Image: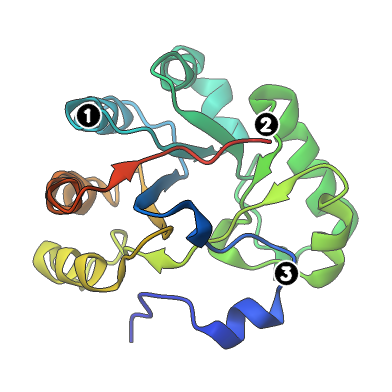
Amino acid sequence: MAYWYVSKWMKKLYPTVIWDRRADGKKLYITFDDGPTPGVTEKVLDLLDEFNAKATFFCLGRNAERHPDLFEEIKKRGHTVGNHTYSHLKGWNTDDETYYDDTELADHIIGSRLFRPPYGRIKKSQIKILQAKYKIILWEIMSHDYEPRLSEKICLKAVLRFSREGSILVFHDSLKASGKVLYVLPKLMAKFAEKGFTFEAIPEN
């Protein structure tokens, strides 16, 4: 079963991380994980430009290192970037020291105060360590664009249904997710633009 949105009890369980930006009004915060990915990230950037939208890209350190020009292009177009660890570690299965060292390795390349744990799986002890330096950003809406068993139309229907003022949404600028994200993203932005929404990047401050 795909869980499209985060429940209130989950937010209460981890109250010190950021799940949404509800107080900001008619804005959506579109985010992308796991890039930059040649052949995908460029197309995502062009779609965002069409709607004068800004977004936040939580980049893997190893991908930003491999594709520095594409990483710089994200920032050049006015988007914010965030740390998604260097090697996509799952916090629940990783000791705190290794997790922190991998995050710091990525920070040398990405240089952002924003952090998102891969899979959203992070121990409270890791949160405590990282919050001394980073704003930990989770999400309210998960697009499931990486799920091969879900169709593009199902993903679109779900994000349109559950997104609301101040929602933080997760997409992926990866090869696996590219078909769905390139289908869903423009339709999502068109629909919410009609309602008077704007699309903003998550600020570092």
Dot 1, how many residues are within 10 Å of its Cα: few (below 14), some (14-19), or many (20+)? some
Residue in front for this viewpoint, 163 or 127? 163
**Residue lying at 54% horizontally and 32% vertically, measured from the top left:** 81
Up the image or down, 140 lies above or below 60; here it is: below
Tell me the residue that label 3 is attached to: 93
Tell me the residue that label 1 is attached to: 43
Up the image or down, 17 lies above or below 52; here it is: below
**Whole-percent x and y of residue 12?**
67, 81
Up the image or down, 9 lies above or below 74; here it is: below
User: For residue 92, what is the image quadrant?
Assistant: bottom right
Res. 95 in view: no
Which amino acid is tagged 1? Answer: Lys
Q: Earlier in the sequence, mark 1 or mark 3?
A: 1
Up the image or down, 29 lies above or below 200; here it is: below
Which amino acid is tagged 2? Answer: Ser
Apparent side of residue 23 relative to residue 31 in the rendered image (left or right): right
Tell me the residue that label 2 is attached to: 112
Residue in front for this viewpoint, 133 or 117? 133
Q: Earlier in the sequence, mark 2 or mark 3?
A: 3
Numbered label attached to residue 108: none
Which amino acid is tagged 3? Answer: Asn
In front: label 2 or label 1? 2
Q: Which corner quadrant holds the N terminus?
A: bottom left
**Whole-percent x and y of residue 30?**
38, 47
In front: label 2 or label 3? 2
Decide: marks 1, 3 in contact (CB < 8 A)?
Answer: no
**Residue lying at 36% horizontally and 51% vertically, measured from the top left:** 28
Label 3 SS: helix
Decide: marks 2, 3 in contact (CB < 8 A)?
Answer: no
Label 2 SS: loop
Give me the C-alpha separation between circle 2 and circle 1: 23 Å
Give me the C-alpha separation between circle 1 and circle 3: 34 Å
